[in-house]
Image: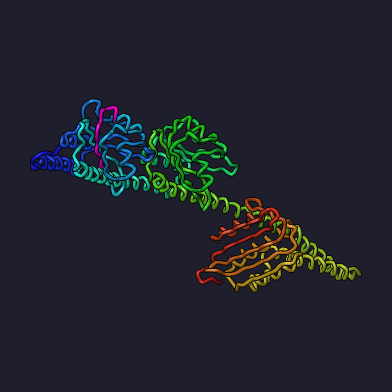
C-alpha cells in the first residue's frame, strides 16, 4: 500500500512494469508471463493473492495465472461459473474495473469460495484485447482496511501490458495458422488439379483438416437421394459409427441434420440434446462440441464436413470459416469428378447412339429401298427379254419395275427425313420446324426468332424440338404445345412446353437423355421440368459461334 513518500513505491512500480514489458517484448510463453505478472502485482501491492482469469463463451472463467500463499488463490487451470455478487462476475458484466470492499455479502460460486478464503476486499481490472473483453486481473486482501483508492488505476497498467502480450501472441499465432492453412489448402488444391480419385482425396482432406484445426475428430458425409447419410471419410478419434461406409437415416436433432435442413454452417457446443442415430453415435463416441459446413456442388447440397472435439470447451469462433475454405475446394473437386464421369458416359452414349443409327440406316436401306431397287432391276431385265421376244407382258413388267423404283424413292425420302429434313438444310431452323409440324397431330404455337446458324447448332436445335414434340404426342396426353427459340447473349435458347400430365424423365436410355448428350457435346445446358400433373418444360441452351451465326 502507498503511504508516505511516493518516490520509492513509484520506482518499484516502474521497475516491475519494465520487467513485465521486457518479457512481453521477448515473447515468452503465456504461462510464464502470467505467472510473472501475478507475482509482480502481488508483491508490489502487498496483497495476499493475485489471479489472472480468462473469460469463456460458456459463461465461465478459467484461472490461467495466480500468486499467493497456499490455499489463498484459485488453482491455475480451474474453471468457475460466473454469476452472483463477486468481482469476476462484476467485471465480466460491466467491462470496467471494479472493487468490492466488503466480501461478507458476496454470492455465487466465486463469491462463496473467495469468502471462504478470508478475503475482505479485492480489486479487479479487465484485460481488453483488441477492444474485446479477454479476462481479468484480481488483487485480493484479507486485511480489514480496504485496498487504496488508486489500486484500480495502478493495476490497469499491468493489464495493458498483459493485453499487449496476448494480442502479439495471438497475432503471431494467426500468422502461423494462416501460413499452415494456406499450405494445407495448396496441398489439397494440388490433389484436386491432379484429378485424384474421390476416395483418396476425401481421406487426404480429413487428415489435413484434423492436422490444422485443434480438433480430435473429422468426418465427411454425403446426403444420399434415399434420405440416408453416408460417411465417406473420417480421421481421428472416431468410433465404428463414423468410419467410412457407415450409413444413417436422415433424422433427429443433431449437427448433421441442422446442416441438411438449412444448407448453412452450424455448430453445437453440447451434444446432450442430440437425437437420432447420428446423435446417439456421437454421444457414444464421447463427442462434446462440433462444427459443420455444407458441401455445395453445382448449387445443390451434396454433403457435410464435420470437425469436433472430445474436450469440454467449445471450438474457436472461426472454426466454421476455416472448415469452409476446405469444403469449397472439395466441392470443386467433386464437381470436376462428376463432370469427368458424366462426360465419359455421355461420349460413350453418343458413340453407341451413332453406331446404332448407322446400323439402323444400313438395316432400313437393306430391308427397304435396296430390296425395292434390286427387285426393280430384276423386273426391268425381264422386261428387256420380253420386249426382245415380243412377249405381250413387257409393258406389265415395266410398270412393275417403275412401281418398285417409286416405292424405293419414297422410302429413301422417309429415311432422309429421319436424319435431317431437306427444308432444314436448305433454309434453316424455321423452315425445318415448319416441315416437322406438318407431321405433328397436335396444335403447336411457334415463336422462332432466329436466323441461320451453324449446321451443328441448327441440327441439334431441330432434334431437340423434334424429340420433345414426339414425346408430347406419344406420352404427354397434351392438348397443345409451345415451341420458342431466341438468341440471348450469344446463346440459343430453345424451349418446348406442353399442358400434359407431366412426369417425363431424362437420363440414360431415354430420348430426352440422348438429347442431353447432344446438347452437352456442344457445351450447352439441358433441363427438363415435369412435375406430375403440371405439364412438361424442356429447355436447351446452346452457345453459338463467336459471331453467333453460321
Q: Specify the segment rendered in magenta.
A: 115-125
Front-lying residue, 273 or 489: 273
**Residue occupying image coordinates x 74% and y 60%:** 478
Residue 293 position in % (x across, y down):
46, 45
Residue 119 position in % (x across, y down):
25, 31
Left or right of 408 in this view: 101: left
Task: State which quadrant residue 409 falls in.
Answer: bottom right
Q: Is residue 393 magenta?
A: no
Colour setup of the view: rainbow
Q: Is residue 124 magenta?
A: yes
Task: State which quadrant residue 431 falls in.
Answer: bottom right
**Residue occupying image coordinates x 42% and y 47%:** 324
Question: Where is 216 relative to 126, above or below?
Answer: above
Front-lying residue, 374 or 353: 353
Left or right of 171 in this view: 229: right
**The C terminus lies in which quarter of the figure?**
bottom right
The count of marks equals 0
Task: State which quadrant residue 136 falls in.
Answer: top left
Asked whether residue 78 is in view, the answer is: yes
- Outermost residue toward the top in this view: 70
Front-lying residue, 349 or 112: 112
Residue 200 position in % (x across, y down):
45, 41
**The N terminus lies in which quarter of the figure?**
top left
**Residue occupying image coordinates x 34% and y 43%:** 93
Asked whether residue 202 is in view, the answer is: no
Residue 23 position in % (x across, y down):
18, 40
Amino acid at each position: 500500500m502507498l503511504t508516505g513518500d511516493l518516490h520509492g513505491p513509484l520506482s518499484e512500480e516502474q521497475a516491475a512494469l519494465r520487467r513485465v514489458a521486457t518479457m512481453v517484448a521477448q515473447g515468452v510463453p503465456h504461462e510464464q508471463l502470467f505467472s510473472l505478472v501475478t507475482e509482480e502485482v502481488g508483491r508490489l501491492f502487498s496483497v495476499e493473492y493475485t489471479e489472472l482469469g480468462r473469460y469463456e463463451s460458456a459463461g465461465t472463467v478459467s484461472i490461467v495465472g495466480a500468486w499467493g500463499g497456499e490455499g489463498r488463490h484459485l488453482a491455475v487451470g480451474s474453471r468457475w461459473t460466473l454469476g452472483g455478487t463477486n468481482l469476476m462476475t462484476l467485471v465480466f458484466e460491466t467491462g470496467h474495473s471494479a472493487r468490492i470492499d466488503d466480501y461478507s455479502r458476496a454470492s455465487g460460486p466465486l463469491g462463496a469460495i473467495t469468502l471462504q478464503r478470508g478475503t475482505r476486499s479485492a480489486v479487479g481490472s479487465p484485460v481488453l484485447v483488441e477492444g474485446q473483453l479477454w479476462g481479468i486481473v484480481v488483487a485480493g486482501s484479507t486485511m480489514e482496511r480496504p485496498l487504496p483508492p488508486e489500486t484500480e488505476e495502478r493495476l490497469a497498467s499491468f493489464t495493458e501490458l498483459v493485453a499487449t502480450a496476448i494480442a502479439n501472441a495471438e497475432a503471431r499465432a494467426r500468422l502461423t495458422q494462416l501460413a499452415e492453412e494456406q499450405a494445407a489448402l495448396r496441398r489439397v488444391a494440388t490433389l484436386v488439379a491432379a484429378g485424384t480419385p474421390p476416395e483418396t482425396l476425401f481421406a487426404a482432406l480429413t487428415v489435413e483438416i484434423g492436422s490444422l484445426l485443434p480438433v480430435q475428430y473429422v468426418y465427411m458425409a454425403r446426403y444420399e437421394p434415399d434420405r440416408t447419410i453416408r460417411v465417406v471419410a473420417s480421421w481421428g478419434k472416431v468410433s465404428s459409427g463414423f468410419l467410412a461406409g457407415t450409413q444413417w437415416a436422415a433424422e433427429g436433432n443433431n449437427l448433421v441434420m441442422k446442416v441438411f435442413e438449412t444448407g448453412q454452417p452450424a455448430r453445437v457446443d453440447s451434444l446432450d440434446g442430440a437425437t437420432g442415430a447420428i446423435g446417439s453415435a456421437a454421444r457414444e463416441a464421447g463427442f462434446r462440441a462440433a462444427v459443420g459446413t455444407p458441401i455445395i456442388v453445382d448449387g445443390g447440397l451434396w454433403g457435410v464436413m464435420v470437425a469436433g472435439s472430445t474436450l469440454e470447451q467449445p471450438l474457436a469462433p472461426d472454426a466454421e470459416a476455416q472448415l469452409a475454405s476446405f469444403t469449397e475446394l472439395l466441392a470443386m473437386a467433386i464437381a470436376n469428378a462428376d463432370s469427368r464421369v458424366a462426360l465419359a458416359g455421355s461420349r460413350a452414349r453418343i458413340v453407341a447412339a451413332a453406331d446404332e443409327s448407322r446400323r439402323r440406316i444400313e438395316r432400313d436401306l437393306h430391308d427397304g429401298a435396296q430390296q425395292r431397287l434390286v427387285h426393280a432391276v430384276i423386273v426391268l431385265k425381264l422386261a428387256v427379254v420380253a420386249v426382245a421376244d415380243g412377249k405381250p407382258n413387257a409393258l406389265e413388267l415395266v410398270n412393275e419395275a417403275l412401281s418398285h423404283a417409286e416405292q424405293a424413292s419414297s422410302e429413301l425420302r422417309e429415311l432422309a427425313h429421319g436424319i435431317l429434313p431437306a427444308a432444314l438444310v436448305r433454309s434453316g431452323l424455321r423452315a425445318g420446324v415448319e416441315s416437322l409440324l406438318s407431321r405433328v397431330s397436335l396444335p403447336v404455337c411457334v415463336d422462332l426468332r432466329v436466323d441461320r446458324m451453324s449446321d451443328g447448332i441448327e441440327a441439334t436445335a431441330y432434334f431437340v424440338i423434334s424429340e420433345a414434340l414426339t414425346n408430347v404426342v406419344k406420352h404427354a396426353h397434351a392438348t397443345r404445345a409451345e415451341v420458342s427459340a431466341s438468341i440471348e447473349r450469344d446463346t440459343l435458347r430453345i424451349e418446348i412446353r406442353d399442358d400434359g400430365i407431366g412426369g417425363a424423365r431424362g437420363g440414360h436410355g431415354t430420348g430426352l437423355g440422348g438429347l442431353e448428350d447432344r446438347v452437352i457435346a456442344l457445351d450447352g445446358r439441358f433441363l427438363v421440368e415435369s412435375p406430375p400433373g403440371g405439364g412438361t418444360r424442356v429447355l436447351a441452351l446452346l452457345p453459338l459461334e463467336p459471331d453467333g451465326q453460321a
